[in-house]
Amino acid sequence: MKMSHSSEEETDISDSELEEYTEECYKSLMNGGIKVELSDGVYRCWYCQGRKRRDYKYKELLQHCSSFRSKNVKQKGRHLALVRYMEEQFKANGSMSKSTTEAIEAPMGNDSTELFVWPWVGIVANIPVEKKDGRYIGKSGSNLRDKLAAQLFNPVRVNPLWNYKGHSGFAVVEFNRDWPGFHNAMMFEKSYESNRKGRRDYFAAKHIGGELFGWVARDEDFHSDSIVGEHLRKTGDLKSISEIEAECKRKNTKLVTNLTNVIEVKNKQLKEIECKYNETLMSLSEWMSEKDKMHKAYNEEITKMQQNARSQLEKILEDHEQINKQIELQSKELVQREKELEKREARNEDERRKLDSEKKMNERATLEQKIADENLLRLAEDQKREKENLHARILELQKKIDARQALELEVERMRGAIQVIGHMGEDGDLELKKKRDALQQDLAEKEQDLEDLESLSQALIIKERKSNNEVQQARKELINGWMGQSSRATIGIKRMGDLDSKPFHTAAKRKYGKEADSKAMELCSLWDAYLRDPSWHPFKIIRGSDKEELQEVINEDDEKLKNLKNELGDEVYSAVTIALMETNEYNPSGRMEPSITPLKDDCISVRCSTPEKLFGRGPIWGSICCDDDMCQIDDKDDLEVGASMKFDSALLSDYMNLGSPM
């Protein structure tokens, strides 16, 4: 029956889809998604859900799958994949029949000198074709392959032969390149010969009709001038059974020898790897024990430091309690003396003044003790914060050490892994080589990170040592220079943030009269303590004249400043606000007291070329002309130098404190 052009394309598309789907189902079976073998010799077809019988023997299941016919491409592809899976898996596992097992061995009944086309090839002739558009067309090779597979000939593929006229009516059937493949090829030939459709029948028949002829390709076909002979000469070669058997034995012997040598080499490599592993394990154990010792020593040192700090704090508290008891005892004695004087009605003015003076001194001592208590609490809090910061720093350094040690261990582990993969990958495994290259690249990156950490650590240590030496030297020279000046020197530094006591004396004289000096000292000490209290910050943020820059100014609405202005006047208020602004500008962090003795000048301007000349080390230290605002050094040896250096007390104090030892 002739087919139209559209039906031919539909058949080709269906065959292509069938091959793809069969391959997918076969991969699914190979991955173990479906368990075909239920028990020894019993198999199940999971694709026939509606059938009553689903469990078969090996041959029965092959016959069922091979004879399965359905218009559904998926059902057909599943059964073909199951046939392929059964033939490849359960034959290799020894589950095939006895006749099939005997066929694996070299056939002994055939003439060992007879020449066959190698690899085993079958020829199918008289395939039905039809002429269309000037060319002959026929069915695809997959259709014929399915028919041969249904007859249990297990072909690998079927290639129809085409020439310039189209389909030649011949097809070449390829079998597996082993003895089971030869057995399938001979069964294929005997099947056609038994039906009188062999090679002799094909060439002897005068009227071949529409049936297929088939036989195994031999030397006659190989040397023929037909399209079949041309194809066989391109794709195969002529070999006898004895030659193929000898070649197989030679390959097997060579393979066994090579595998024996590989096993010996692998055993040696395995012993070497075991030795290296034991060495690494021993070094790792030693390192872990050393690390445990370091942790133990570190914990003991931390415990000792905490105990020392606790004992010091307890001692300070005990001294504080003793001082409080002494002050209370003195207060009681003074009260008792006051009562005795009242009872005696002492009228001596000197004794009364002395008693009042002692009471005031006692009150001042109580106030100073209160301030000292606050300072003590603040000192304890600062010490606690410093301990916490130190502990956090120690933990951070410990984490860095652990990270570095982890990086070193990772580098050693990767080196060992590369060596192991290098030994295992000598037989040319591409996947192991790729894995080894990836590990080598990671190892190079880890080693580079480790080298960067080492170089950064060394650079920071060198930089810190160099900076510390420079600061220490500069501080020593600066202190020696200022210590060398006489007590009459007019070059000095004003201590920024120092409270001026003159307005307090003036206000105390105006308000308290005879007790002005003591009250002025008391008020000055009180406000000096307020200035150094970090918790008091009477400032606010406003915008400048350009509406963009933010400025920090005195908060005039602060309760303490308002009470100060109302009680002591504008002069004292101005002195306190000036000291606040200077402290906030030059030493805002903690408001610690500067370490340089104050003089009356706000700043000094020195005209010289080097700091060494400032301290009299050079030849230019000559006569000094000074006034209330500026001190100028006349440089007799370097009259052309015009550079000037201007600085304040807070800057110099910070510089000297920077160089002071911790």
Image (cartoon, helix red, strand yellow):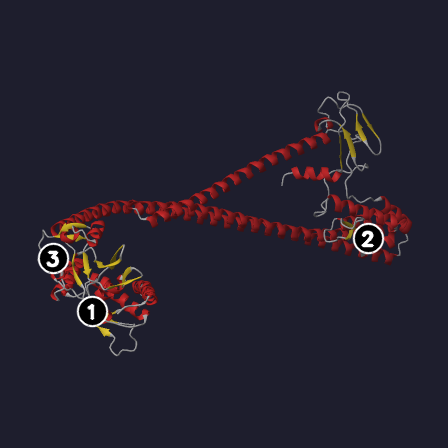
Q: Mark 3 and mark 1: span between their CA atoms? A: 24 Å
As drawn, which residue projects farthest toward the bottom? 52
Q: Is residue 333 above or below residue 598?
A: below
Circle 1 packing at 10 Å, graded few (<14), some (14-19), many (20+), is: many
Q: Which of marks 2 and 1 is in front?
A: 1
Q: In this rendering, would 574 be left or right of 293?
A: right
Q: Which of marks 3 and 1 is in front?
A: 3
Q: What residue type is labelled 2?
A: Lys
Q: What element carries label 2?
A: helix
Nearest the viewer among 318 and 598 is 598
Q: What residue type is labelled 3?
A: Pro
Which of the numbered marks, if any, corresponds to residue 171?
none
Which of the numbered marks, if any, corresponds to residue 359?
2
Which of the numbered marks, if any, corresponds to residue 107?
3
- Assess whether mark 1 and mark 3 are in contact (beta carbons under 8 angstroms): no
Q: In this rendering, would 28 be left or right of 352?
A: left
Nearest to N terminus: mark 2 or mark 1: 1
As drawn, which residue projects farthest toward the top? 637
Circle 2 packing at 10 Å, graded few (<14), some (14-19), many (20+), is: some
Which of the numbered marks, if any, corresponds to residue 58?
1
Nearest to N terminus: mark 2 or mark 3: 3
